[in-house]
Image (cartoon, grey):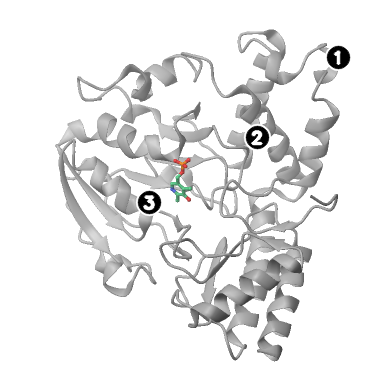
Amino acid sequence: MGNERVYNFSAGPSMLPLEVLEQAGSEITNYQGSGMSVMEMSHRSKVFDQIFQDTQAKFRKLFHVPEGYKVLFLQGGASAQFSMAPLNLIGKTGKADYAVTGNFSNIAYKEAKKYGTIQLAASSEDKGHTYIPSQDQLKLDPEASYFYYCANNTIYGTEWQYVPETRGVPIVCDMSSDILSRPVDVSKYGIIFAGAQKNMAPAGLTVVIIKEELAGHELPFTPLMMNYKTMIDKDSMYNTPPCWCIYILGLVLDWLESKGGVEGMERIKHGKAQMLYDVIDSSRLFRCAAEPGSRSDMNVVFRTGDDELDAKFVKESVAAGFTNLKGHRSVGGMRASIYNAMPAEGVEKLCDFIRSFDKNN
Ligand SMILES: *Cc1c(COP(=O)(O)O)cnc(C)c1O
């Protein structure tokens, strides 16, 4: 292996800001004079409690979390929320609405069916998940306990550009792959959740933002560890939380603040994505499957239409210092995941590479 860092377009776990890795490295054996690593601390110690409280406060501030909402630091990945949300919320009416716009919302939809009557509010499967349904296309049941959708479809490269209007039905949203990339009006949501490993921290932490009044109505057989109320009452410390990931999230949030917060990130990420889409759209060889208007600013999915040429692109991209540009196995082609930590320079270099591949093939 070489000594140079590569431009890593992984969909997740993905890049972290270099400054964050360097700071974590500099204090890895002795965190701020404590004489130990954050990895070695009791989660009940004063030093760790400070890290925990600071990280929570920074998250609330940067993500503009209003009063009445709790920020939880849980485990089990985003996938655990596919069960946890229905277990805790569906008891209200026994029904829920799901919009299926890709792989992860489909898994969530199937999982929820174990616990109640689930209506498919919309599906983009008719066109291979290349678009996001419009508000008019959503079939909403006013008696649903909640409405569920996934904000950014990591595999298909589509992203919701609006918050659905549900007329009082609480919204549950999986923001695993676009959280902290743009401002969100949290007050429009019941629950927002995200696995950390795309845009926040190492794998092992799931951030859940929940309107407190929604907790406490779980189905009677809800496992202790999957009960939002348990975690709210114990401030995410019912058991040992993912301490190291929480510490790294704190560093990432400092970095985010130095870049202008989510407002700054929105400008930067949109510029990066636009640059890439422009190069693809004006190329001879490459096309995006996602419809304009539904395209993701986080995961840019593209292909030539010729599997051999795609494979050649991926192979040559590795030699040129890029990694993880191969598309997800279920859709093929290429995917460039350009989360917050991917510098504009990495995207510019990728654009140059795409242009020259387009010219030479
Ligand atoms: C990666 C991802 C998941 C799965 O996350 P885990 O933490 O591995 O469970 C779920 N939803 C979306 C949108 C994702 O991108």
Q: Which amino acid does the dot numbered 1 rest on?
A: Gly
- What numbered label is drawn on residue 249? 2
Give me the C-alpha separation between circle 2 and circle 1.
Answer: 20 Å
Contact? badges 3 and 2 (CB < 8 Å): no
Give me the C-alpha separation between circle 3 and circle 2.
Answer: 23 Å
- What numbered label is drawn on residue 33? 1
Task: Mark 3 or mark 2: name the one nearer the start of the chain.
Answer: 3
Q: Looking at the image, which residue is at 37% across and 36% down?
A: 81
Quick one: SS at disc 2? helix
Residue 46 at x, y = what percent?
69, 9
In this view, the residue in front, 175 or 266, is 175
Task: Mark 2 or mark 1: name the one nearer the start of the chain.
Answer: 1
Q: Is mark 3 within 8 Å of ligand 1?
A: yes
Read off the residue under disc 3. Answer: 104
Front: mark 3 or 2 = 3
Say few, some or many: other residues with alpha carbon within 10 Å of mark 3 (under 14 / 14 to 19 / 20 or more): many
Say few, some or many: other residues with alpha carbon within 10 Å of mark 1 (under 14 / 14 to 19 / 20 or more): few
Using the rendered view, name the quadrant where residue 213 is placed. Answer: top left
Give me the C-alpha separation between circle 1 and circle 3.
Answer: 43 Å
Q: Looking at the image, which residue is at 25% across and 25% down?
A: 218
Residue 137 at x, y = what percent?
25, 68
